[in-house]
Structures are given as C-alpha cells and as structure tokens.
Amino acid sequence: MSADQLAQAVVDAITAELAALAAEDADAITRATAEKTAALAALQAEVASGARPPRALLEQARDLNAEAMLRSRAKLLSVEKRLAALRPPPVPPREALVYGRDGRWA
C-alpha cells in the first residue's frame, strides 16, 4: 500500500473509533483502536522506507485523534460521576456491642 492509502486507513480507523465512542461499544472501541495502531505502524514503516508523508491526511488524522481523546476523557468523567451518584452514603459509626456479665448482649 502507498503512504496515502495507509494514511487514509489511519483516518478511517480513527473515524471508526469516534463512532464506537459515540455508541459506547467497548468491543468496537477496542477493534478500532487496534486497527488505528496497526495502520499507524504500517504508515511509519512506509515513511521510514523513504515514502513521502501525506501531510494533509496526517493533519486530519491528528485532529480526529485529538477529538477522540477528548471524547474518551469526557466519557470517562461522565461514568465516574454516574458511579459516584450510585455510591451509598457513608454509614455513621455505631457504638460497639459489648457482651455483658449476665451473658446477654448489652
């Protein structure tokens, strides 16, 4: 594949990652992230072998990736807030139970 095709694959993978984030589909997020990582590695190898980097596609990929990072961080914060709302209130401390002389709990 050419560097342009590989860069387009990176853009497509990041776009798929954004769609998976919007759908809150953990499996799709994992797949898209793996595809993005593989496409980036292939593109890096192509550029290292002397291919000219496709600047416009790389800038688009950078912008999309920044958006994906911000959205994933926002999702994480919203989940943390929802979990905090589910947490039960703290239980006030109670007096210790003492076993009395008469064999009963005091």
Image: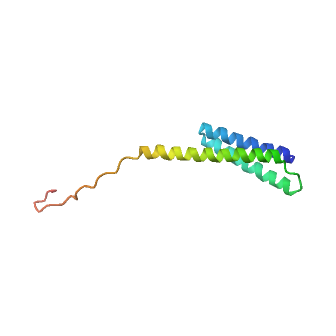
Instruction: Give the image quarter of residue 49.
Output: bottom right
- Seen at 27% across and 55% down, the residue is 93
Left or right: residue 67 versus residue 11 is left
Instruction: Give the image quarter of residue 94.
Output: bottom left
Q: Position of residue 77 (x, y in %)?
A: 53, 47
Can residue 7 be seen in this snapshot? yes
Left or right: residue 106 versus residue 84 is left
Q: Position of residue 32 (x, y in %)?
A: 69, 44
Q: Quadrant of the C terminus?
A: bottom left
Instruction: Give the image quarter of residue 98.
Output: bottom left
Q: Position of residue 33 (x, y in %)?
A: 68, 47
Considering every residue shown, the one lying at the far bottom of the view is: 101
Left or right: residue 5 versus residue 30 is right
Please count the marks in the image: 0
**Type of colouring:** rainbow
- Seen at 85% across and 57% down, the residue is 48
Relative depth, front residue between 69 and 12: 69
Relative depth, front residue between 17 and 30: 17
Can residue 35 be seen in this snapshot? no
Q: Position of residue 3 (x, y in %)?
A: 85, 48
- Seen at 59% across and 48% down, the residue is 73
Left or right: residue 52 versus residue 100 is right
